[in-house]
Amino acid sequence: MRSLTPQLRFGTTIACVAAGLIAFGFSGCKRTPPPQTIARYPSLPLREVPEYLRDTILERTDVLDTQPLPVSGFGLVARLRGTGNNQQLPTAVRNYIVKEMVKNGVGSHNQNGPQERRYTPEEMLNDPTISVVRVDAYLPPGARPGDQFDVQVSTLDGSNTTSLAGGVLYRTELKVDGANTIQPGYKVDVAGASQGPVFVNPSYVLGGASADTPAAKNSLRYGVIMQGGVARETRPLVIKLRQPQRSLARAIEILIEERFASYKTSPTEKFASAKDEGIVMVVLPSQFHGDWEHFAGIMNHIYLSNSPNFRAMKAKQLADEAVKPGAALEDISYAWEALGPVSLPHLGSLMRSDKPDVVYAAARAAAYLGDGGAVDSLTRIAMTTDHRFQLNAVRTLGDLNPSPQVNQALRTLLASEQSLVRIEAYKVLAKNNDPSIYTKQIGTKFMLDIVQSDGRPIIYASRSGIPRLAVIGNKPAMNLPTMFSTMDDQFTISSSANQKRVTIYYRGPGSREPVTIQSNPDLAEIAARLGGEGPGQERLLNFTYGDIVAILQAICETREVTASAQGQKFVASFMMQEAPSLQDSVSSAPIIGGDTGRPQ
């Protein structure tokens, strides 16, 4: 067969190349669809808010991590009065505690105390003055390193420890799920630490018939370490955008930084940081002293528009809305705060309104913005007996920078007929270091406040926060002659008919030999003497704050502690601060705006 001619071969080559190019062209022009972008955050509708609150951070976001964070651990309580028993410990918990004791030198020759030097960790766990406990706390929202909080200690399930009264907790690490009985200590990150004296319900500490009930026996197995926890890490608030958008997240960061710029303690301090299109992390400024709700209230009500004309217009609109029926006054008050001093010209007339909630909402916002006239309005509310917002006003005054004007008004409330008002006024004055209150620190145990007042005598003891004992009135004192005994007669206070002083006698656990001291009969001096105050040449008592509160409560129950007021003699009443879960009866004075409060 003859071969193809050169021309034909060339034409065939061209045809093949063309066919290939055509085939490549069709395949090359076929576009591959781009990969689908998976949204990291769901898109939600904007929050429904009144028209005057539109275009606020509140409308566009949700604030997360506002619940207390549970942290826990296992620890050792020492100095019990023979009530500890660790025979029924879970094996994993016992091994963990022994390991921690060895790591920290507890019970080894490194300790200074001669008694502890003789003990191995295992021997210490057999000592009835020692008990292994579970330690629980809630790390508050917005917590910063060094912030303090209350801690609860409790005996373990199945433990034969009968009472934690008088005990002191060794330093214990607190972690998320730290008190895991299966794997104690398996968590690495330490959120906080705790230590200190255990405060047990004083109604049962002294023993007697009241301590033999099932409820009392259960109560003695629980205690609180007031301000015993210390945060080790920052716990920021989390702002989550309802409709994620990087530019909006960045704008919110800038708005928060601008609004709280005056709260910065250094030029490099930063409160807000946009992480991505959906999340902004916010650190609570230290000037809010842990009051994250107040901070979040202002932050939520920042408007996205920040021009001077807009802010002036919005302040006027909010003032018009505030007087309408059903106005969300709490939100409006926060919005005024968020707008800043531009709100002040519109608040003066509202503070003269005939509506108490409008007056308080305006005065509250104006006071936080530095208006002196608002302090006058709040003072008038605080001084008005049975005013619906009296307690609110006292608490707001307590948030402001101390001033002679505020303190003078609160001093008059120390004689109020309403006990809650008196206590709130006292707490603000004590915080302000007002000279009308004589304060003495009793060792490292508690603060003793002597509060001169023409009102009826009150003995007040805190059970949360800083341990404080307040003796309010005109020198409340035990009536003489007296004979008081408790702790199965191991503790007595007595005097003879002709004596002007009392003799305090103690021969119970913790005292190697009986202690006898002299004191004036007024309760403040007795409290100080019980805590270890007295002449250096005397043997001194060394009761814990919890013991002292229990003794003073028992003394007051005899109705033999009196003081003069308005020319008459009155029996002193004893008041214990409500447990934190119940204390909201004080702070729950009415929400401004009634039930219409917060749109969310």
Image (cartoon, rainbow, N blue to C red):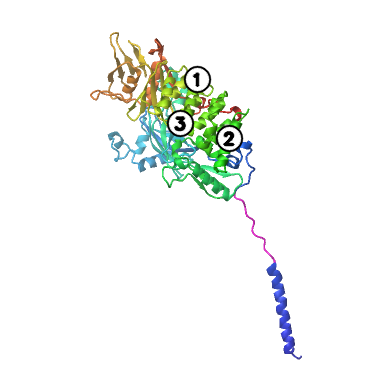
- Counting labels gives 3
Work out how far the residue at label 1 is from the one at label 2, CA to CA, in angstroms: 29 Å
Real-space Cα separation, disc 1 to disc 3, in angstroms: 19 Å
* Residue 55 image offset from top left, x and y in percent: 60, 41
The circle drawn on residue 11 is none
Quarter of the image where one finds residue 456: top left
Judged by depth in the image, the label closer to the viewer, 1 or 3, is: 1
Please tell me which residue is depicted at 35% across the width and 38% down the height of the picture. 121
Q: Reading the chain from its start, which is encountered first: label 3 or label 2?
A: 2
Q: Is residue 119 left or right of residue 332?
A: left
Q: Which residue is mark 3?
A: 399
Who is closer to the viewer here, 356 or 285?
356
Image quadrant containing the N terminus: bottom right
In the picture, the quarter occupied by the C terminus is top right
405 left or right of 511?
right
Give the residue pinned by disc 2.
Answer: 316
Q: Is residue 165 magenta?
A: no
Give the structural element (helix, strand or loop) at label 3: helix
In primary-sequence order, the first of circles 1 and 3 is 1
Judging from the image, what secondary structure is the residue with disc 1 in?
A: loop
**What span is in magenta?**
30-40
Q: Residues within 10 Å of mark 2 (few under 14, many from 20)?
A: some
